Amino acid sequence: MKKKLLIELIIYVVLVVVGIILLFTYEPKEKEIIIPQDFRLGMERGVSNAALYF
């Protein structure tokens, strides 16, 4: 019984360590954000909170 709990604890510790390593080494890919033309027109006119109705 004690041996089973020890093995389970080791597995959980390994999973936590791998999770922390992945958390700090993950680098998201940079994506270009494309703003639709409708939104660009409002920004060029100086309207900061323009609402678009379709």
Image: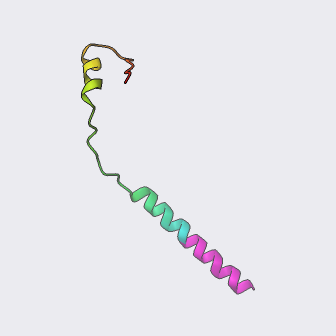
**Quadrant position of residue 48:** top left
Q: In which quadrant will I find the C terminus?
A: top left
What residue sits 28% from the left and 38% below the top? 33
| Above or below for 38 versus 8 | above
Q: How is the image coloured?
A: rainbow
What residue sits 27% from the left and 24% below the top? 38
What residue sits 28% from the left and 32% below the top? 35
Q: Can you give x and y, in whole percent of width and height, for residue 17 in the image?
A: 52, 67
Residue 15 lies in the magenta stretch = no
User: Which is nearer the eye, 25 or 28?
Assistant: 28
Q: Is residue 17 left or right of residue 3?
A: left
Q: Which residues are magenta?
A: 1-14
| Above or below for 54 versus 19 | above
- Looking at the image, how many numbered discs can be counted on the residues? 0
* Residue at the farthest front position: 54
Q: Is residue 18 left or right of residue 5?
A: left
Q: Is residue 46 left or right of residue 13?
A: left
User: Which is nearer the eye, 48 or 51?
Assistant: 51
User: Which is nearer the eye, 19 or 51?
Assistant: 51
User: Which is nearer the eye, 47 or 4?
Assistant: 47
Q: Can you give x and y, in whole percent of width and height, for residue 3 in the image?
A: 69, 86
Main SS of the magenta part reads helix
What residue sits 54% from the left and 70% below the top? 15
